[in-house]
Image: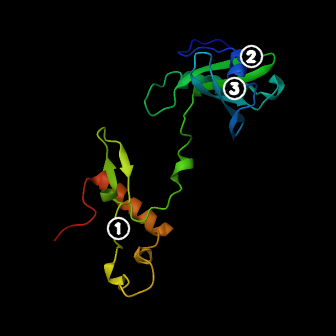
Amino acid sequence: MYLKFRVPKLNRAELETAYEDFSNIIDTLAGCIVYKGTLSSGVEIAVASTLVASSKDWSKNAEMSYWKKIDILSQVNHKNFVNFIGYCEEDEPFNRMMVFEYALNGILFEHLHVAHSNLNSHNIFLTDDYAAKIAEISFLPQDSSKSKSSGDNESAYSTLPPLADVETNVYCFGILLLEIISGKLQYLEE
């Protein structure tokens, strides 16, 4: 199958050299393995290669789906999409690969699992280019009436509120989304 795409068809030998002969696996997804590599130009890449080893095991539907995905990805040009660099398809030996820019900092999933204890719009700061940064910088407990007296032997850390439970985190995030979408304050001052 030959179609004209906005990305180049890449050579299997170059890709195998780039990702060190299948040794640099960074992830295994449904139906493919993702390898990290570096092209001869110095560009770091992620190569998604199908797990199907024979054209007999590759259906016509899978082939159509592959080419449709290549067509769609080759048209995407947006700062929030991983750049699609090219593809590789060969019948002997059989392979279908898609080549993307390598995202140095991994995936969002690897960075999300932090329990925030009071996520709200007052804890999200904006940099000079309006990138949002979450910070929890308060030193005092939420309810100072529950704090220990200075005569107690317990450390000052015992006065800090515990990390919020899941329900509180979901509620706080919902309120934050409501503020973003509606443009209204989370509470009305009387």
Q: Quadrant of residue 17?
A: top right
Question: In which quadrant of the rendered image does the N terminus lie?
Answer: top right
Secondary structure beneath disc 3? loop
Horizontal side, residue 186 vs residue 80: left or right: left
Q: Residues within 10 Å of mark 2 (few under 14, many from 20)?
A: few
Q: Nearer the viewer, residue 92 or 11?
A: 11
Task: Give the residue pinned by disc 1.
Answer: 139
Q: Nearer the viewer, residue 89 or 43?
A: 43
Q: Nearer the viewer, mark 1 or mark 3?
A: 1
Between disc 2 and disc 3, whose residue precedes?
3
Alpha-carbon span between mark 2 and mark 3 = 17 Å
Q: Where does residue 49 sit, x and y in percent of width and height?
A: 70, 29
Alpha-carbon span between mark 1 and mark 3 = 48 Å
Task: Give the residue pinned by disc 3.
Answer: 19
| Three-letter amino acid code at the position of disc 3 | Tyr
Seen at 30% across and 58% down, the residue is 122
Badge 1 vs badge 3, beta-carbon distance below 8 Å = no
Q: Where does residue 144 sit, x and y in percent of width and height?
A: 32, 79
Q: Where does residue 77 sit, x and y in percent of width and height?
A: 45, 25
Secondary structure beneath disc 1? loop
Q: Where does residue 84 sit, x and y in percent of width and height?
A: 55, 25
Q: Nearer the viewer, residue 115 or 154?
A: 154
Q: Can residue 26 be seen from the camera position used here?
A: yes
Seen at 72% across and 21% down, the residue is 16
In the image, residue 107 above or below residue 75: below
Task: Give the residue pinned by disc 2.
Answer: 90
Q: Quadrant of residue 21?
A: top right
Q: Nearer the viewer, residue 7 or 34?
A: 34
